[in-house]
Amino acid sequence: MESFRYSQFCPIARAAEVLGHRWVLPLLRELFIGPQRFSDLRRRMGGAVSTSVLSKRLVALERQGVVARRVLPPPAASVVYELTPRGRALEPALLGLIRWGALMMTSPLSGEHFEPEWLRLAARAFARSETTPELSFELHATGQGPDAIVRGHGGASGTHIDSPDDSVAELCVRGPAVVLLGYLAGEVSPESLTKHPDVVIEGVTQRVAELPVLFDVPSENSGA
């Protein structure tokens, strides 16, 4: 990464010196989902970033103390990149950027890449903090990459996104990640969701209309 400095004694300037280069924020997005191999990082970014640029970004983020390399034990015996405590400290800002970025989003454009696991970060960013219906749910998101599972529950303390486990959720919705995101955002109606040929709803199906209530997705109309 280029050694650019703003020459300003300011936290925003320092952050911009680390985050302001091309591909850095998408790269950190992937590492917030979990440790990744170099090849996985490139694939998950749609193959649009060159290997040389990706290498430079990773080296610079290591130097900044944001990312670290770890060698997995056999039989994997491969190198993964993961966030350091300094890198993980960016989480509140990253979730805030997701909420802010949602204001600029419309329907996906032709050819735009979307990883199902991005829905996991979106769910965390859009989870309501105030009281929501008591409902446990699982979203099985399908798409261009490996399927992803988003599990959570609503209640008096708001919506919480959990790690998947073996317990049975009251409601399970399986379908394309973009469709599920559109449903949580209110862009896809319950009727359209239930009639979608690639969507399967299991469990307490009559409560599917309550699912979007557990989330607060900013839109240009809401001004959120």
Image (cartoon, rainbow, N blue to C red):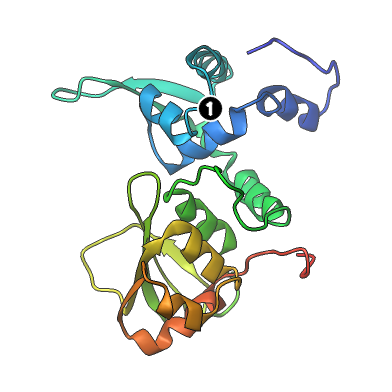
Q: Secondary structure at mark 1?
A: loop
**Where is residue 145 shown, x and y percent of the image?**
37, 44
Q: Quadrant of residue 167?
A: bottom left
Determine whether, in the image, residue 7 is placed left or right of residue 112.
Answer: right
**Where is residue 141 shown, x and y percent of the image?**
38, 58
Q: Is residue 193 above or below residue 26?
A: below
Task: Identify which residue is drawn at 26% across, 20% down.
Answer: 78
Q: Quadrant of residue 207?
A: bottom left
Q: Amino acid at mark 1?
A: Ala
Tell me the quadrant of the picture where the N terminus can be found: top right
Circle 1 crowding by C-alpha within 10 Å: few under 14, some 14–19, many from 20: few
Residue at image mark 1: 48
Task: Identify which residue is drawn at 73% across, 53% down.
Answer: 104
Task: Identify which residue is drawn at 54% across, 21% down.
Answer: 65
Tell me the quadrant of the picture where the C terminus can be found: bottom right
Q: Is residue 73 above or below residue 141?
A: above
Task: Identify which residue is drawn at 53% across, 70% down.
Answer: 183
Q: Residue 165 versus residue 194: which sits nearer the camera?
A: 194
Name the residue at the bottom extreme: 206
**Where is residue 83 shown, x and y percent of the image?**
47, 31
**Where is residue 43 shown, x and y percent of the image?**
42, 31
**Camera sees residue 134:** no
- Tally of numbered discs: 1
Q: Residue 205 versus residue 27: which sits nearer the camera?
A: 205
**Camera sees residue 49:** yes
Name the residue at the left extreme: 75
